[in-house]
Amino acid sequence: MNALAPSEFILNEDDSIYHLHLRPEQIAPIIITVGDPERVSEVTKYFEEIEFTVHNREFKTQTGTYNSKRITVISTGIGTDNIDIVFNELDALVNIDFNTKKIKKELTSLKIIRIGTSGAVQPSIAIDSFILSGKAIGFDALYHYYDKAEPAGDSFHEALLSHLDLPADFASPYVIDADQELASVFMKDDTFIKGITATNVGFYGPQGRVLRLRLREKDLMSKLSFFDHHGKQITNLEMETSGIYAMSKLLGHKAISLNAILANRSNGSFSQTPLETVDLLIQKTLTLIASSF
Ligand SMILES: O=P(O)(O)O[C@H]1O[C@H](CO)[C@@H](O)[C@H]1O
Ligand SMILES: O=c1cc[nH]c(=O)[nH]1
């Protein structure tokens, strides 16, 4: 194959990749993603060693060692548009040769774990609990831009589309599963609830929040909470998981998303201890990584 053109595979003057500002040797095989750049050091404060800190725009990265395992922690900022950048560039860091600018023959598969915050849509899900997204429903359009082998008719997806019956000018929601192997490692800890996560394209209107603007699809939140396909219900809302699952599936990486439930939209409540809840999820995640990989 030809070398990738400088307009497609973009390197900075120091030969780091365009947005993340990272070089291939700076990436570990285990990646933790967080939304908030401030959360990166909340994870790495538990590391024995931090090799470096690189920060460009919303993308802050630290690689270090926890319990002798090399781990990279990176912030994605908010939204699946950022996920497109982070995942293409993380993949390029391991699967494109930075000298020849060609795709490597032997591809590397990363283990990727998101530690995020989220709002529950079912009344039974307690504030400050933890959900592992077994499936993600993408209300964003990211997955539609990439060529893929279409899955054979999935009855869950078909039932969801017909239940939601969205206007034709909304993106058509897509559904992608978590990596089963990684999910089973984390489900060994019975504090995780296995859920179905809706990833929305905004925090306000797209998640049914009304401040000053009125909504077009006024009953979208109740449609999400009442959807039931043979006992499978949508549990929570956030803004990155579908993109993470889509890009990981397309690129051959293994991903799971862990959600600290800070809001419950069905009863209007919000966590009294958001920082402590996220910290507990961080500690649980690091312990499971250390004991399982
Ligand atoms: O806490 P993070 O990881 O950013 O996740 C959630 O919080 C943000 C909204 O407040 C969105 O990014 C949503 O996905
Ligand atoms: O309600 C919530 C809480 C956290 N993150 C979201 O995207 N929504």
Image: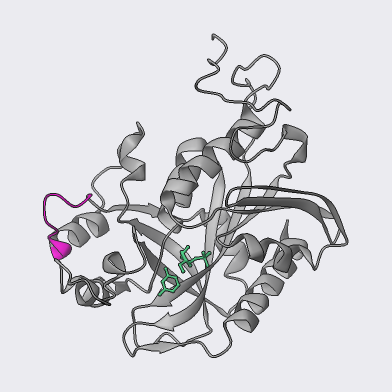
**Farthest-out residue, top:** 2
**Which image quadrant for residue 146?**
top left
Look at 19% across and 55% down and name the residue there: 158
Look at 31% across and 85% down and name the residue there: 266
> Residue 276 in the image: x percent, y percent?
65, 83
> Residue 156 in the image: x percent, y percent?
26, 59
**Farthest-out residue, front:** 212
Look at 45% across and 57% down and name the residue there: 241
Total labels: the figure holds 0
**Which image quarter holds the N terminus?**
top right
Look at 67% across and 68% down and name the residue there: 285
> Residue 103 in the image: x percent, y percent?
59, 21
Q: Is residue 190 left or right of residue 200?
A: right
- Residue 71 in view, yes or no: no
State ligand 2's quadrant. bottom left
What predominant SS class does the magenta segment belong to? loop
**Which image quarter holds the C terminus?**
bottom right
Q: Which stretch did the figure color magenta?
A: 163-171
Q: Is residue 43 above or below residue 107?
A: below
> Residue 233 in the image: x percent, y percent?
31, 73
The colour scheme is: one colour
Q: Is residue 165 left or right of residue 157?
A: left
Q: Is residue 58 above or below residue 164?
A: above
Q: Is residue 176 left or right of residue 53?
A: left
- Residue 288 in view, yes or no: yes
- Residue 123 inside the magenta-drawn segment: no
Name the residue nearer the viewer: 159 or 64: 64
- Residue 165 inside the magenta-drawn segment: yes
Q: Is residue 200 above or below residue 212?
A: above
